[in-house]
Amino acid sequence: MTSTKPTTPEKVYSVVPRVAKDAHIKGITQYKKEYQRSIEDPEGFWGEKAREALSWFHDFDVAHYGGFDNGDVAWFLGGKLNASVNCIDRHIVTRGDKTAILWESDEPGVHRRITYKDLLTETCKIANAMLTQGVRKGDTVAIYMPMIPELIMTMLACTRIGAIHSIVFAGFSADALRDRIIDAQSKWVFTADEGKRGGRTLPLKKTVDEAIHGVHVVKNVFVFKRTNNPKVPFHPKIDLDMTKIMPLMRPYCPAEWMDSEDYMFILYTSGSTGKPKGVAHTTGGYLTYAATTCKYTFDLQEDDVYACVADCGWITGHSYIVYGPLCNGATTVMFESTPMYPDCGRYWDLVQRYGITKFYTAPTAIRALMAHGKEFVKKYNRSTLKVLGTVGEPINPEAWKWYYEVVGEKKCMIVDTYWQTETGGHIGVGLPGAAPMKAGSCGLPFFGIDFAILDDQGKELEGVTEGRLCIKSPWPGLARTVYGDHHRYLSVYMAPHPGYYFTGDGARRDADGYYWITGRIDDVLSTSGHRIGTAEVESALVAHNVVTEAAVVGFPHRVKGEGICCYITLIHGVDGTNAVMKELTQQVRSIIGAFATPDIIVFVPSLPKTRSGKIMRRILRKIAHGEEDSIGDVSTLADPDVVPAIIANFKHVL
Ligand code: ATP
Ligand code: MG
């Protein structure tokens, strides 16, 4: 593997002393010692973490069983526990009056504080409402709700009675919702009359009505109220008005004893690479992993005000708004709005008003905010911040530096967290009290994660290298199956490299053992014998001040094997002239090298993104291949209308 190694070593940013001072893991030596123990004795290590992080009704007998080959991985066998008890009840004595959820509504400053005691009461009422309607352990329940506290309470109510929740992000269409309801066979749906986001109103109940029309599997729809719009349709035969039901319910509900390996939830992946997969997680392993990663990645402390501004409809919301923070007894901020509403200072306004100490967002948001300048950041006091997290995509060094220097004023640790819906929690991350940072690297493996880099033939490569990122042995947070399709589980993750879990991503390992995600394996180009991660070309492009975003794909090239095609959005007011095109070509040549010279540059109004903000490169690849007739599943695309515009611009360039 050649060419993607930078010729000069990357700059290393030291651990910030004010973060390291009281950290759970202080210094690289302590990290290495713990890491080594976790790899040499995973059963001992995870057994200890599971007992430390969670309360068990009944202790487990065996820490770990099974492997990748049959996909029969199981953790904490014989153990009995309940997720909602771990998130709520066990904190009542010591933290009953502590704020569990700090909810900020779409309208700035309008908020609710929910203590752990309140959370218990409300969760129990919802759980009892579900029991009254016949929901039982093992049933699946679809949730299509706005970002209001009742969403978290509903998740916890499901797990309290042993129902398996299947959350569908409330921006999805009726068709996407219907597919997921049918795939998971959910007989109940939770929703709200309407949602609010960025000043807009989302017709959630109406979408649910459309989704379940003619779908006989659905028995009832539980409806909360967010806007109280009297015009929202209500069908008394199947709809249940939660505002009327809640006051009738008993505010305590005993919790179901769940086996460690009982399913806890299903969640569909974001569909960047194809039809979404219904990833299934189990109770003991998932919770142990979510709680442990949350504690160490964000170095959670008792007085933290912790904010993950993702949506609960993604795995990030599951693990790091709800289960991770609440298992740790933290105060978790739930944010209903967007980073741009009412203006680009919203995040930092939030930080100032609530004194947020740990903040977690996505590169796509950082890049968008960066395009609007520093002023929106500087206006607010951010001195409480200590750890700034990012997730979802490789972060380009430009955006990383902006996050570090402008937002964090070089006083915060940036944690770039690499993971997947399937991994349950972070698998690559530099711990904030321990690992010096490199802009664009997701740092080191998390405890218990034994990474391997393989070549295309499946041979494991040692030392400084690049290739296909795999994991050598199971960890508690690994998804146990694709719901209803174990064959797909085996074929996607286990079959490509027998004996390993295959992430589907490419990665480089540097001399310090740091990992650099180069993008999906499909996104690594081979041009004139050089291997180039599309992420690297994209980084070089967005480093230019006229570029907002870039997406790079390969296409068949007569001479080079694969050519480099770049789709670019420009900042407001700049046109895609030939001069700009030349400058960008030069930029890539000087940052990466002449071998990475773009073959095609297409300026586009916007890029095709999933609802979770990820660029769907496979669509761009189809266009570059001239195969726009077979684009495939686009149900998770945020704005399908961008596709024809991109096709038109592409044809214009050719
Ligand atoms: P699908 O599997 O349906 O194609 P998806 O992979 O986008 O969808 P997720 O599980 O939400 O669904 O995303 C996980 C992927 O996101 C990872 O495999 C990786 O490609 C990317 N990713 C997440 N975090 C990071 C990060 N910090 N650095 C680099 N890549 C990341
Ligand atoms: Mg994936």
Image (cartoon, rainbow, N blue to C red):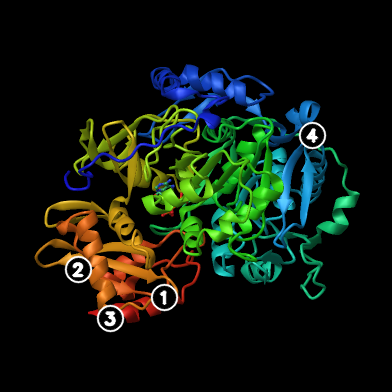
Residues at marks 3 and 2, CA–CA distance in whole angstroms: 14 Å
Q: Is residue 532 above or below residue 173?
A: above
Residue 605: assigned label: 1
Q: Secondary structure at mark 3?
A: helix
- Of tags 2 and 4, which is closer to the observer? 2
Residue name at image x 53 percent, y 33 percent: 293
Residues at marks 4 and 1, CA–CA distance in whole angstroms: 54 Å
Residue 33 percent across, percent down from the top left: 42, 18
Residue 274, image quadrant: bottom left
Q: Is residue 210 above or below residue 241?
A: below
> In this view, which residue lies farthest toward the right?
248
Q: Residues within 10 Å of mark 2 (few under 14, many from 20)?
A: some
Write down the residue under mark 2: 599
Looking at the rendered structure, the kind of residue marked 3 is: Lys
Could you tell me which quadrant the N terminus lies in?
A: top left
Counting every numbered tag in the picture gives: 4
Residue 18, image quadrant: top right
Q: Are marks 4 and 1 in contact (CB under 8 Å)?
A: no
Write down the residue under mark 3: 651
Q: Are marks 2 and 4 in contact (CB under 8 Å)?
A: no
Left/right placement of residue 443 relative to residue 479 reads left
Q: Secondary structure at mark 4?
A: loop
